[in-house]
Image: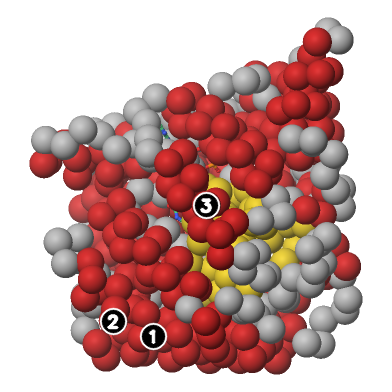
Amino acid sequence: MSGARAIEEQTSRGGDPLEAAIREIGTELAAAFPSNARHPLRAIDKRAMDLASGDQELKAALFRFVDVTPACRSLDDLARHLREFLREVPEAPPPLAVAMRMADSKAGRRAIGAAAAAGVRHMAHRFIVGETPASAHGVLRDLWNHGVASSVDLLGEATVTQAEADRYAARCDEALGELARISAGWPARDVLERDSVGPIPRTNVSVKISALTPLLRPDAPERGRRDAAERLRPLLRRAEALGAHIHIDMESLDSREAVLDLVLDVLSEEEFVRGPSAGLVLQAYLRDSPEQLERVLEWASASGRTPPLTVRLVKGAYWDHELVQAGQHGWPTPVFEVKAECDRNFETLTRRLLDARPAVRVAIASHNLRSVSHAIAYSRLSGADDRDLELQILRGLGDQLADALAVRGFRVRAYCPIGDLVAGMAYLVRRLLENTSNESFLHEQARGVPIEQLLAAP
Ligand SMILES: Cc1cc2nc3c(=O)[nH]c(=O)nc-3n(C[C@H](O)[C@H](O)[C@H](O)COP(=O)(O)OP(=O)(O)OC[C@H]3O[C@@H](n4cnc5c(N)ncnc54)[C@H](O)[C@@H]3O)c2cc1C
């Protein structure tokens, strides 16, 4: 029976079983969050984020500063930049005012530079698990030992030449090999390695199509698609040989059609209809996402591909970009502009996806306790086993939620970027923006909004 039918039947007997289950699951998960007291570094980050989110000008200055950090040649240079950016903040908070005065002397500048560089590096390490797959091994193994699987994302600069696209593809290929090698020695974890359809790969790599080709242009999508497919096919072959999973990330809307067409076309090719395990991403902040989902589900049912396509449902990371882009061209905004509408759409798509199992595997990627509890509650009400639902978080943003989910026996996967500090800057800035935006769930949670409110229907 679909979840909707089960809920209708129970509702006719009084009450709202879905809302009641969401409240119960959400409250239990919140209680299982590890406390900050046991993680002092997280508490320090939270204070830094509170400071930044309370002051828009300070936030803007800090973002600009984080952006230039990799280009600074010395600590002196770094401190000078910090002072210049902070000068733009009309009323700097007291510790920053002290830093600005210190930056007037060379010794002071060096001290601040060292502190700032360490701060940026510390922040980056919260989100980035290592410079290479080999150096990330310790973190990935610890996650696995704590009941958390991973998907590795290789950070890189924008791909503008064929040589850069070749290099990115080669890095993905190496990562697949390296991760398969190291994960082979990890202990068995049934909950992370099997659902009712069959085995789930330990090695999971997230790939960006825009990094696989320099030719991805909205005005000439065919060229980009063809070029990217040439680099995607060998990666799929390699994943198939290693028993690994390849997940294609979704980026901004101007590449959405090309990415979706490419992935569905390549996975339909005779060579790939029996594997490897693969997936794509659906962005619920897009107003037309319900139609996109129908297209994917039709494909999944018609193709009969095994293992089934994994659909990762996200809200979307390019909200400001889409809004600005549409505004500049005078286009209608493609994204919801009211957060609650986006959240409601996320829940509608969650239910549609969960009802479509086993034609697809479902991964709900969110740090929002309401969105996650809704998925778990609906899945359970429809009679499914918890192992037929995967929950995903971004490393550094959803660690506490991941711990709570793992402790309660859910399959949870952390998205783990790998790369150097320079490559990590764009990623870091995007995550900081998300985390300190006033409407973000994590920001509300950090502000101490009561749990009943956090779990209320959007
Ligand atoms: C494992 C994983 C993989 C991911 N992969 C991708 C990917 O491939 N592509 C991608 O785009 N993103 C991806 N994301 C990022 C994801 O889109 C963001 O984490 C997500 O947007 C944050 O949503 P939330 O549910 O955690 O938090 P919430 O705080 O509940 O939601 C924040 C989101 O709501 C939306 N939003 C904010 N304000 C408004 C508004 N005024 N009106 C309407 N909507 C608004 C935005 O999408 C914003 O990011 C991934 C996330 C995870 C956890």
- Residue at image location 61% in from the left, 61% down from the top: 310
Give the residue type that dot 3 points to: Glu
Q: Is residue 389 shown to the viewer in this render?
A: yes
Which image quadrant is residue 436 in?
A: top left
Task: Give the mark count.
Answer: 3
Callout 2 secondary element: helix
Callout 3 secondary element: helix
Q: Nearer the viewer, residue 227 or 96?
A: 227
> How far apart in space, not on screen, are marks 3 and 1 (Cα)?
26 Å
Q: Is residue 173 left or right of residue 191?
A: left
In this figure, which residue is indicated by the disc labeled 3? 298
> How far apart in space, not on screen, are marks 1 and 2 (Cα)?
7 Å
Percent x, y of residue 234: 47, 89
Circle 2 crowding by C-alpha within 10 Å: few under 14, some 14–19, many from 20:
some
Percent x, y of residue 118: 48, 66
Circle 3 crowding by C-alpha within 10 Å: few under 14, some 14–19, many from 20:
few
Q: Is residue 61 left or right of residue 294?
A: left
Discs 3, 2 touching: Cβ within 8 Å: no
First in sequence, mark 3 or 1: give its number. Answer: 1
Here the colouring is secondary structure
Name the disc covering residue 227, or none.
Answer: 2
Circle 1 crowding by C-alpha within 10 Å: few under 14, some 14–19, many from 20:
some
First in sequence, mark 3 or 2: give its number. Answer: 2
